[in-house]
Amino acid sequence: MSKLYVVGIGPGEYEQMTMEAYNVLKNCDVIIGYTVYVDLVRDHFPEKEFLTTPMTKEVERCELAFEKALQGNTTAMICSGDAGVYGMSGLILEIGQKYQQVEVVVVSGVTAAISGASVLGAPLIHDFAVISLSDLLTPMEKIEKRLECAAMADFVICLYNPSSKKRHDYLKKACDIILRYASKDTVCGYVKNIGRAGEESTILTLEELKECEVDMFTTIFIGNSQTKEMNGKMVTPRGYKNV
Amino acid sequence: MSKLYVVGIGPGEYEQMTMEAYNVLKNCDVIIGYTVYVDLVRDHFPEKEFLTTPMTKEVERCELAFEKALQGNTTAMICSGDAGVYGMSGLILEIGQKYQQVEVVVVSGVTAAISGASVLGAPLIHDFAVISLSDLLTPMEKIEKRLECAAMADFVICLYNPSSKKRHDYLKKACDIILRYASKDTVCGYVKNIGRAGEESTILTLEELKECEVDMFTTIFIGNSQTKEMNGKMVTPRGYKNV
């Protein structure tokens, strides 16, 4: 049976890939992905066939992957971070219903919430919510409801896709919603270009975060009521009873 | 300056560690951890000094790690999954305020939410909340509030520590809270022993999940209103506008 692997390659640096992901890429025939991610791995596997499709051509990319697998190629579809957190494994499994002859295997990777947290310190030690601010496929009211409920329950909140050209004020809006429930002094942080050239992190208050301009390569962390700054690191305690 | 690494080793299988984690363990002098996790890596690094402390002795384990580092040993504290999701990096950074001569470096790993999701299919493709049902350090009312808010906002919910000897009915209680907002047919799944011998996964409805007996090595996934079962896999769509 032909195999199609959906592989999370981690945040960018080759070293942050799991050994399992590395072995899949080493042993496959074809590697498919969004152009930017393919470029991150290309030099490490020079003998492979590489195929790329641009952003927004996700369905076509999946079809291409299944066609390559059907032709007898062990095929790997790569995703930045994890394959399953805002990644391609869902669409592959949906489209895979048409391609029962191809076995799909999902290989995990370190998503930006996890890798960004390590850069900042330990913001996700306790319960957390992950929310994308992209309203391309999700109505804004749904996103706002999630921000509100997450803040109400005092979750640490990690925001993906905090900004784009069309959505330059979404982070400000998100902070305004969270500020209804959280203190303006809540400890927050963000990391740009996690695990890549130009990695940069900042710790700041929720009030300061609200006024920040960030780009689409930034992951945002909003602490819970107990999160503290310690020696320049963002740290959430393990629980509530001991504080 | 002495270095203390806090390293997430992934869900268990040696292969699911990142290459960065592998390199840190290969190059350090001392590896410290909870007995069960140390046993997972011991055979791969036979020449190291290993130190273990039992569960609940976390503070002592951290002090021991700093003392070893202070003595000039490159030291690695290992955690199952990720170092930062219910892991040891927070406590290490807290205690590290007393040990300014030791540099702490956090190395990410694949946490059970991510690795369990890959086993089940793609449940975490869209916004999700991670909640621990352990009330050892967190008041039960706080946990209940989070379950309620997460269900209200239609997050996919991932539950850690769903059960223990003293808490055999907590999963049932959690399902009851979620059932106030979610359909009894909500697609759910759980994975036992992720990435280890005896790995086992099940997809079922929320109503069925409520009646399940699970152990502490189980990670639970409760879908959002759009999550579906497809060919025996649990899949959450990328968004809401296209369904």
Image (spheres, coloured by chain):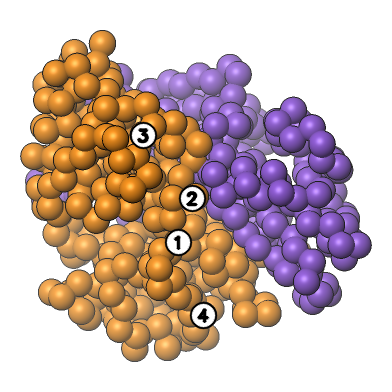
Chain colours: A purple, B orange
Q: Amino acid at mark 3?
A: Leu
**Secondary structure type for disc 2:** helix
According to the image, label 1 marks what residue? B195
CB under 8 Å between discs 2 and 3:
no
The CA distance from mark 2 to mark 3 is: 14 Å
**Residue A235 versus residue B216 in the image, above or below:** above
Direction from residue A102 to residue A146 in the image, left or right: left
Which residue appears at 50% of the width and 19% of the height? A200
Q: How many marks?
A: 4
The CA distance from mark 3 to mark 1 is: 19 Å
Q: Residue A176's x, y, as percent?
A: 46, 38
Of tags 2 and 3, the one toward the viewer is 3
The CA distance from mark 4 to mark 1 is: 17 Å
Which residue is more in the foreground, B137 or A49? A49
Question: Is residue B229 shown to the viewer in this render?
Answer: yes
Which mark is first along the chain, 4 or 2? 2
**Residue B81 versus residue B65 in the image, above or below:** below
Direction from residue B240 to residue A176 in the image, left or right: left
Which mark is first along the chain, 1 or 3? 3
Which residue appears at 33% of the width and 53% of the height? B40
Of tags 4 and 1, the one toward the viewer is 1
> What quarter of the picture does the N terminus of chain B occupy?
top left
Which residue is more in the foreground, B207 or B78? B78
According to the image, label 4 marks what residue? B203
**Secondary structure type for disc 1:** loop
Question: Is residue B145 shown to the viewer in this render?
Answer: no
According to the image, label 2 marks what residue? B16
Which residue appears at 28% of the width and 74% of the height? B215
**Residue B64 versus residue A152 in the image, above or below:** above
According to the image, label 3 marks what residue? B25
Direction from residue B85 to residue A37 in the image, left or right: right
CB under 8 Å between discs 2 and 1:
yes
